[in-house]
């Protein structure tokens, strides 16, 4: 028997933030500074979908099963986190301390730390334990307002262990109601045993890993860490092309420390996004401004490693669309808190609150290929949204950088327990 749909009416919303028509997929350049809001608003959801919203004085008489009064509170779409490495075996506090003492991220990696350190630990950790840890982390992120997420492999670096991570991500997809996208990042680093024969590792990725992952339908996207000491732009091109043959869309790590042609290769391969961009040449900027590829900045990584922040002003001035993401991982960003990411974008990258919120919602949804479903308050989109505690305005969110202003998170129209 079909159950009757449940309609909930939220009234007296102080600010209903990021209201858009359903067909807006992303915003670029000057349009990023526009964040459409309705003050003193109502919102109606039917089961898991947003069906109506508007100004309170246009509410009239609407039938609903439940009415929720949100006087003084804001409603905004949940954050979309388009770049994380959520499945990892262990934290890396020892490297953190070594960096405080003066070593750089690259020096630590050369000594066998970094990604290879994480891979060593992950290879021996059972799948079930990886799942339990990742599940805990994801629950916490949802409490912090994340309502859609991308998760990468890349700490396996062998066929078996890469599959292990991707199966954990698959299980997360089955166990959570938020949209989760999986990215295959076998090309995260050259494993120690392939140090003298890197071409063989690349062949392993192309001939064995990609076909097997595609066969089991374990990934949506393909990623490469295109960087000095990791993968060249030529190798990146080779791997992306191999992935595309199996329907894996590129989303890649580029320009974290050096610009070595990754942006060009990414755009040429129709990358959905190019991520990091702490270093940006004029050529990169010009290529990005003519593409449909989303530029993703990862301010928590810059904050944690003490490296330059992505030049948001330059990108926005060049009419490039920008998203921001957490890069949650044990080495360069041991936090997936998107509220802090939004704050950092404002405080350190000189993005306005409007630009930063657009970057963490609608544009981040684009970087997940999900802007038809999430990323804004639009009729027909999934009812994933944040209800704040009573606050002054949406600018209070980045302003009060260490406060938790989230009162409730709704996923698919249902209230989740945030405490
Ligand atoms: O996005 N840069 C490459 N990958 C991660 C860091 C991985 C690690 O250090 O474990 C990043 O920053
Ligand atoms: Fe990353």
Image (cartoon, rainbow, N blue to C red):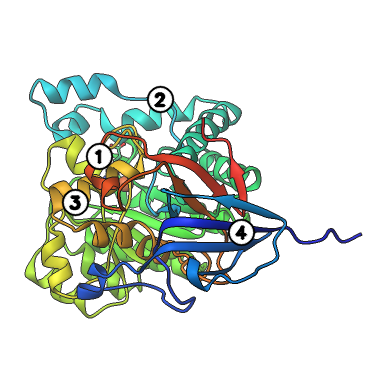
Q: 376 or 299: which is nearer to us?
A: 376
Proximity of marks 3 and 4: CB atoms separated by less than 8 Å = no
Circle 2 crowding by C-alpha within 10 Å: few under 14, some 14–19, many from 20? some
Q: Is residue 349 left or right of residue 38?
A: left
- Residue found 36% across the figure and 30% down from its top: 118
Q: Earlier in the sequence, mark 1 or mark 2?
A: 2
Q: Earlier in the sequence, mark 3 or mark 4?
A: 4
How far apart are labels 3 and 4 at the CA level?
33 Å
Q: 231 or 25: which is nearer to us?
A: 25
Whether ligand 2 has any atom under 8 Å from the Cβ at mark 4 is answered as no
Q: Earlier in the sequence, mark 2 or mark 4?
A: 4
The total number of labels drawn is 4
- Residue 86 visible in the shown view: no
Q: 237 or 177: which is nearer to us?
A: 177
Q: Which mark is residue 400?
A: 1
Residue where numbered disc 3 is placed: 346
Proximity of marks 2 and 4: CB atoms separated by less than 8 Å = no
Q: 364 or 73: which is nearer to us?
A: 73
At numbered mark 1, what does the secondary structure look like: helix, strand or loop?
Answer: loop
Whether ligand 1 has any atom under 8 Å from the Cβ at mark 3 is answered as no
- Residue found 26% across the figure and 28% down from its top: 113
Circle 3 crowding by C-alpha within 10 Å: few under 14, some 14–19, many from 20? many
Tell me residue 199's x, y (percent). 32, 52
Residue where numbered disc 4 is placed: 9
Marks 4 and 1: which is nearer the front? Answer: 4
Marks 3 and 4: which is nearer the front? Answer: 4
How far apart are labels 1 and 3 at the CA level?
11 Å
At numbered mark 3, what does the secondary structure look like: helix, strand or loop?
Answer: helix
How far apart are labels 2 and 4 at the CA level?
43 Å
Q: Which mark is residue 90?
A: 2
């Amino acid at each position: 028997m079909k159950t009757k749909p449940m309609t909930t009416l939220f009234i007296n919303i102080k600010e209903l933030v990021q209201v858009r028509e359903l067909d807006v997929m992303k915003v670029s350049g000057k349009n990023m500074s526009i964040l459409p809001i309705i003050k003193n608003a109502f919102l109606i959801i039917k089961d898991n979908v947003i069906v109506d919203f508007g100004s309170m004085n246009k509410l009239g008489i609407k039938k609903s099963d439940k009415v929720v009064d949100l006087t003084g509170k804001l409603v905004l779409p949940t954050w979309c986190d388009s770049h994380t490495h959520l499945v990892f075996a262990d934290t890396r506090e020892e490297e953190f301390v070594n960096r405080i003492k003066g070593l750089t991220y690259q020096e630590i990696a050369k000594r066998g730390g970094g990604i290879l350190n994480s891979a060593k630990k992950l290879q021996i950790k059972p799948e079930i334990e990886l799942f339990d840890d990742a599940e805990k982390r994801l629950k916490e992120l949802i409490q912090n307002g994340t309502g859609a997420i991308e998760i990468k492999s890349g700490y396996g670096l062998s066929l078996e262990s890469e599959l292990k991570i991707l199966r954990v991500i698959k299980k997360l997809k089955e166990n959570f109601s938020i949209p989760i996208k999986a990215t295959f990042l076998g090309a995260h680093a050259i494993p120690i045993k392939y140090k003298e024969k890197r071409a063989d590792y690349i062949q392993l990725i192309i001939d064995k890993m990609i076909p097997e992952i595609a066969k089991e339908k374990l990934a949506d996207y393909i990623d490469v860490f295109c960087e000095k000491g990791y993968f060249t732009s030529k190798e990146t091109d080779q791997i992306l092309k191999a992935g595309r043959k199996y329907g894996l869309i590129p989303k890649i790590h580029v320009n974290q420390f050096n610009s070595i042609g990754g942006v060009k290769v990414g755009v040429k391969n129709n990358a959905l996004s190019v991520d990091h961009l702490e270093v940006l040449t004029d050529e990169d900027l010009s290529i990005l401004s003519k593409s449909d590829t989303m530029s993703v900045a990862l301010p928590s990584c810059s904050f944690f490693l003490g490296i330059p922040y992505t030049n948001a002003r330059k990108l926005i001035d060049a009419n490039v669309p920008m998203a921001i993401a957490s890069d949650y991982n044990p080495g360069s960003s041991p936090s997936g808190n998107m509220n802090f990411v939004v704050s950092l974008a404002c405080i350190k990258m000189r993005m306005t609150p409007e630009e930063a919120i657009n970057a963490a919602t609608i544009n981040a949804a684009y970087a997940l290929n999900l802007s038809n479903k999430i990323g804004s308050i639009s009729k027909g989109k999934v009812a994933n949204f944040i209800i704040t505690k009573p606050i002054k305005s949406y600018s209070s969110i980045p302003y009060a950088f260490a406060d938790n202003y989230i009162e409730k998170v709704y996923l698919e129209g249902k209230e989740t327990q945030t405490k």
